[in-house]
Image (cartoon, rainbow, N blue to C red):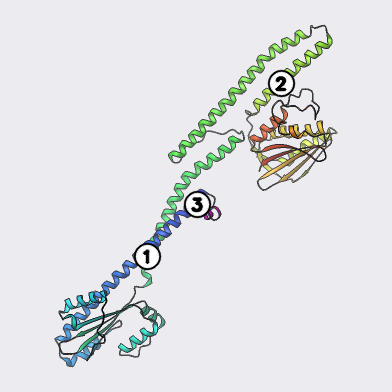
Amino acid sequence: MKFIIKYFLPKKRATQMIILTLMAIFIAQIISFMIFSDERHISLRSEAQKQLLTHITSMVAILENTSSNIHKNIINSASIDGLMFNLNDKANIKRGNIKFIEKNLQRQLEKKIGNETSQIMVKIYRQYNDEINKEIWIKHHNSNHEFSMDEYRKIARSQKITISLHLNNGKWLNINSIITAPPRLWAMPSLMAMLVSAIAIIIIVIIMMRRVTKPMAELTIAAEKLGRGEIVDQLKATGPMDIQTTINAFNLMQMRLDKFIKDRTEMLAAISHDLRTPITSLRIRIEFINDQILRQKLIATVDDMQNMIEATLSFAKNDAIHEDSIKTDIYAMLESIVNNKIDMSEDAKINGDKDIIITCRPLLLKRVFNNLIDNAINHGGNARVCLKKLQNSIIILIEDDGAGVGEDKLSQIFEPFYRIDQARNNEKGNVGLGLAIARSIINAHGGDISAKNITPYGLRIKVNLPR
């Protein structure tokens, strides 16, 4: 069952529900159809047997109350297709074991006519092939009628009843009757009812599943946007009660996240603002120090503090930047950055797949790639940018020919305030937040970023973004 669900059922919940409902309806209708068919077959056959007994009773009454001279004419007139009468000196049925159904039919006929059971014999034949049926009909029918294949098939599906009844004049009335099976067209009303029921249930299932899946699809899209850091409007709580509860919980979570980010940004902005005053005051006082070497060292320390405050504020504000996501040609964006570096006489180049359109916040991504390319040029001497388009994602590789990074430090270079003095020289004003901000922005777009050393030398930054 798990194999069938995994490989054969569609992935969408609504389609699965419709198919499973159809299967349940089909199986239930088939079972009902078989039960109803059997009951109808039994009922029709029972009614046909009652009519046969009525005909026989009438025929016996007529023969017992008329002259034997006209019995032949009466027999010939009463014999029709499916019911044949014959008067003979002996019975067509030999005495022997009698089945329950034959005994029951015999008792019914005895009750109607009033004869002794020994004077009435009944034989019911369940199955006959075409040749036997043809032989029976020709033997008991006073004509040279040739039967068609349809008539043969009809006889083969029928029940043959032979009755031998002893009359008061000493003759035996032999009756051969064929109770034919009901026509196949009788099933059409049942099949039409099945079809109408299936269509009605499918319509109801589609309406109900749409009522469930539509708000769930909207919730999925909103959750994906929220995960990328986009602005998401409050969702309208629709659908069943449990879906509405989920949507309300999502709206509450989003509101709390927005409030948390806003409070954190305001707190860091306030700290940054409050620290600027004492830092400015400290710098003014440093200017009055006569020792020039000491004064320069203190000024450098104060500048580092100022840079750290500004970088921390920028890092915190990154999560709260409200930029709309739009369709962007990522190759064109990277090509413009590389061309700017080339115009500045830097060693940079780009290649790979073109015309790659993704939905993103272009200003933030441009900031990230500009920073990564700057790092490659500043620390590795050059930058090679390569784009690869996959089925569900794109890969951006930024490589340089620098000294690389120690293997034990590759997992730490994206941490805030982490700087690698041994492998790459520090830039002035660098506080170790560039790669941390890059990772934050890439993660906000649903992607990831990683670093790997290149053999024999150099560093490769790999960015994976969903298409």
Q: Earlier in the sequence, mark 2 or mark 1?
A: 1
* Residue drawn at 74 percent across, 24 percent down: 431
Real-space Cα separation, disc 2 to disc 3, in angstroms:
55 Å
Q: Picture coordinates of residue 155 (x, y %)?
A: 36, 80
Residue marked by disc 1? 34
Residue 202 vertical placement versus 98 (above, below)? above
Q: Which mark is residue 182?
A: none
Residue 52 forms part of the magenta stretch: no
Task: Give the amino acid at mark 1.
Answer: Met
Q: Quadrant of residue 325?
A: top right
Residue 7 forms part of the magenta stretch: yes
Real-space Cα separation, disc 1 to disc 3, in angstroms:
27 Å
Q: Earlier in the sequence, mark 1 or mark 3?
A: 3
Q: Picture coordinates of residue 129 (x, y %)?
A: 39, 81
Query: Dot 3 surroundings within 10 Å: few (below 14), some, or many (20 or more)?
Result: some
Magenta segment boundaries in residue numbering: 2-8
Q: Taking the image as drawn, is residue 2 in sight?
A: yes
Q: Picture coordinates of residue 276 (x, y %)?
A: 69, 14
Residue 326 vertical placement versus 73 (above, below)? above
Residue marked by disc 3? 16
Q: CB of mark 2 within 8 Å of CB of mark 1? A: no
Residue marked by disc 2? 308
Left or right of 233: which side holds 89?
left
Task: Give the amino acid at mark 3.
Answer: Gln
Query: Magenta stretch mostly in which secondary structure?
Result: helix
Kind of element beneath mark 3: helix
Left or right of 106: which side holds 126?
right
* Residue drawn at 44 percent across, 41 percent down: 240
